[in-house]
Amino acid sequence: MSKSPGWVRSITNPFTLSLEELHMKRFITLCAVLAAIVSSSQASDSTGHDARFTEAKLTLIEKSLANALESSSPGLQASAAQTVRDLKKLVPEYSFSRLVIPLMRIVKDEGAEIGPRILAALALHDLRSEMGDFAISRVATFTDVKRMKHLCAWLTYEKLIAQKTGVTADSMKAVAIR
C-alpha cells in the first residue's frame, strides 16, 4: 500500500495529521500563548518584577520549548531556538537550564540543517551556561561545516573576551546606542 501525499490525506480526511503536522500545531499554539503573555500589559508586582513572567509560566514555557527543540522538524527547532533567545532577553534572570541539552543536541548534530544549528548555537550562547559554552567551543574545533565552525569560533572568542574584560557584545551595543 503506497502512502499518499499529505495534501491528499488532508483533503480526504482533514482530521488526520502526521506527527510533524501535530508538532507544528502544538508549536503554533505555544507561540500564541507566548504572544499573549508578551503582549499583555507591563504589570509589575510590589517588588518591581514583571508580573507577566511568573515562575509557573516560565516553567510551562520552558517545557514546551524543550519539546519543540526535540522535534524532528527543522522549522520547529529553529523557531523554538529563536523564541529561547527572545525570552532570555525579556527575562534575563531566568536560567532556562532545561533547554541547554536539547540546544546542544541540535548544535552538535552534523546531519542537521544549518539554519536550526546556527539559531541553536546563538540561543545556547545567550543562555551563558558552562556546558553550552563548552559544546560551542567543541563544535568550533571539530565540525566540518565551515559556517558552524566560523560562528562557534566567534561565539567562543566573544565569551573569552567577556571573561577577561567583563565587556560583552550586549554591553558594547548599549554603549554604541547612547
Image: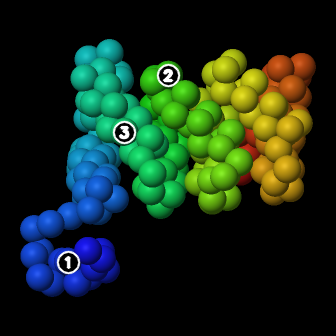
Residue 36 lies, with reference to residue 91, above or below; the image says: below
Can you name the residue that lies furthest to the front here? Answer: 1
| Disc 2, SS | helix
- 152 vs 124, left or right, is right
Q: Residue at x 35, y 22 (%)?
A: 48
Pointer 3 with pointer 1, Cβ within 8 A: no
Label located before the other in sequence (3 or 1): 1
Give the foreground label among 3 and 1.
1
Q: Secondary structure at mark 1?
A: helix
Task: Tell me the amino acid under the disc marked 3.
Answer: Asn
Secondary structure type for disc 3: helix
Task: Give the mark nearest the N terminus, 3 or 2.
Answer: 3
Q: Tell which of 166 and 22 is nearer to you.
A: 22
Please report the residue visible at 69 percent of the width from the left and 18 percent of the height from the top: 130
Decide: few, some or many residues near mark 2? Use Cα within 10 Å; few <14, some 14-19, many ≥20: few
- Please give the name of the residue rendered at 63% of the width and 59% of the height, measured from the top-left corner: 113
Q: Which mark is residue 97?
A: 2
Residue under label 1: 9
| Residue 89 on image: x %, y % | 52, 39
Tally of marks: 3
Q: Are marks 2 and 1 in contact (CB under 8 Å)?
A: no
Q: CA distance from mark 2 to mark 1?
A: 39 Å
Q: Amino acid at mark 2?
A: Ser
In the rendered image, residue 53, in percent from the top left (x then y), is placed at 31, 31
Kindly tell me whether residue 28 is visible in this rendering: no
Name the residue that disc number 3 marks: 67
Q: Quadrant of the N terminus?
A: bottom left
| Relative to 130, 50 lies left or right | left
